Image (cartoon, rainbow, N blue to C red):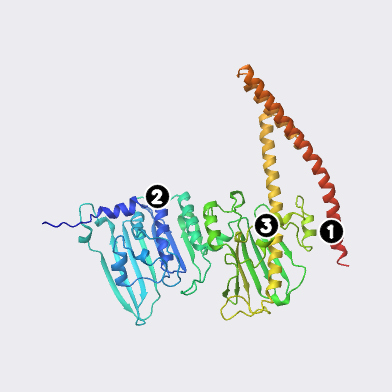
Amino acid sequence: MAELTFTVDSALLSELGEKLVETAHIALVELVKNAYDADATLVTVKIVPHRRHGPEVQVVDNGSGMTFRDVENYWMRIATTHKQVQDVSPRYGRPRTGSKGIGRFSCRRLGTQLKLLTTAALDDGYFEQTEVVFDWSRFKPGKEITTIKCEGSRERLKDASPGTTLIISGSPIDEWSKRGYDFLKRQLAVLAANRGRKRAGFEEDPGFNVALEAPGFSENINNLREQLLSAGWGDLKVRVNSGGEVACTLNALRVGEKAIIYPKKLPDLASVSATIGIMPVVPGEMRNREVISKGSLSEILDDWGGVYVRYKGFRVYPYGEPGNDWLNIERDRAIRRTGLSEILQPFAAKLRGVNPQRALLSLLSSKSYIGDVEIGERASGFEMKASREGFVGEAGLAPLREVIRFAIDWSTIYREYARGLAAKEEARSAREELATQLRHRVKPKEIVATAIRVVESEVRNLATQLPTTERQQVLRSLRTATQAIAKHEASGREELRHLQLVASTSTLVLIFSHEVSHF
């Protein structure tokens, strides 16, 4: 009996590279995911323009790297099951982001030449550095893949740093576009959202970040996570100086930069600081759509949302982890707490359109606040448990919670105010559009009545083309609907007038009480 065996044509690499990976942007994301899976904490991506061809792409990570045998057994082996057998990374226990084994062939999508330089630690304390050059143009259809050799070398080093560098060049065309580049940033931001986590049986994951250099797009991002935190509706900063004065600053959509000083000095919180991104999953409340989209933000918040606590540089668990409500945000949302603290009520009362008794209804979920609280050397009242699972006694946590919640609630007031401004802007735009259509100005108080008349006129014109019975039915429905709108609008106006009277009285009382309390 004759025996047959499969052979592999070099055309397979083209199928896995250029055809399976649709664009250069997706290909580059796959390569950065490989670095994430290799327990890197930082990846630097450079996209360097070329005058005649596509850009040179460099991906440099500080991950675990590969030995010569790793390159031979995993990198050079097509469709290895390595990532399926080991579905988490070896050092930090990160869930693997890919298992198809196509990441390395993404290099073909980015260029015809690849230089791989990788360094890994050996068991005897030395390091091994492996360098391989891949000329993808040699892998031509009709040639068996196993007959094509790639030039490589290895060197044993006494002192080195683990990591992998990929240098890709020779793309015949430049397919990079601004739209594709922004897609790349959003995908990398999802990875850069990893701010660190402890997983049982592994070293504590310190997090992952990305630096991105793209001269062709006039951009140099040293810290993508920092850009991510400032891409949402607002970013909130809290700083406590050596005298215990607490300063809060907010930079947010439609309100710009605002500042407030907490009314009490808290010397025990000296050197405490916080940076928190406020990230509602609402397209109209995102400041930088180049870094986040609704879809990528939902993924980020599900995995990494929450306010972490760090003490003298170390993460303190479980603050900010799923299910831990150390700021009592979920508790207040569950009981539908509406009113602000007495400290913030007079402030809210001064902002037009904000009801101090209902402002907290706009409080976002705890996952929508993403950031860190740093407790520095000069703070007192904090002693971390040996397990780093909370503080001994947690006596210092109460004033810390009070200050951070003060800042978050203060930002919530401004978000409610900003939403009111947005609603007014939308109403103004709609009114101008209606005025353009009618060719005369429409006063704000006449907008509903005018719109009703326009609808009535248009429907009556259309109804003339209907049979008599159907036309009468349509006109009856029109009359019923327009009368309901008019009556509801009149009722709303009366209710608003009443509320304005009540609110003006409440505002005066709040402000008066606040001023009196200072005497």
Q: CA distance from mark 1 to mark 2?
A: 60 Å
- Furthest toward the top, the residue is 468
The N terminus - image quarter: bottom left
Could you tell me which secondary element the residue under label 2 belongs to? loop
Q: Quadrant of residue 89?
A: bottom left
Residue that numbered label 3 is attached to = 363
- Disc nearer the start of the sequence (1/2): 2
Can you say whether 160 is above or below 463 in the image? below
Residue that numbered label 2 is attached to = 175
Q: Amino acid at mark 2?
A: Glu
Q: Nearer the viewer, mark 1 or mark 2?
A: 1
Question: Percent x, y for residue 45?
Answer: 44, 62
Q: Give the left or right position of residue 156, taking residue 239 as reference.
A: left
30 or 118, which lies in front? Answer: 30
Residue that numbered label 1 is attached to = 511
The local crowd at label 1, few if under 14, some if 14 to 19, many if 20 or more residues have their Cα within 10 Å, is: some
Question: Percent x, y for residue 32?
Answer: 42, 62
Q: Amino acid at mark 3?
A: Leu
Q: Nearer the viewer, mark 1 or mark 3?
A: 3
Q: How many marks?
A: 3
Q: CA distance from mark 1 to mark 3?
A: 23 Å
Q: Is residue 243 visible?
A: no
Q: Are marks 1 and 2 in contact (CB under 8 Å)?
A: no
Residue displayed at 65% across by 53% down: 253
Q: Amino acid at mark 1?
A: Ile
The local crowd at label 3, few if under 14, some if 14 to 19, many if 20 or more residues have their Cα within 10 Å, is: many
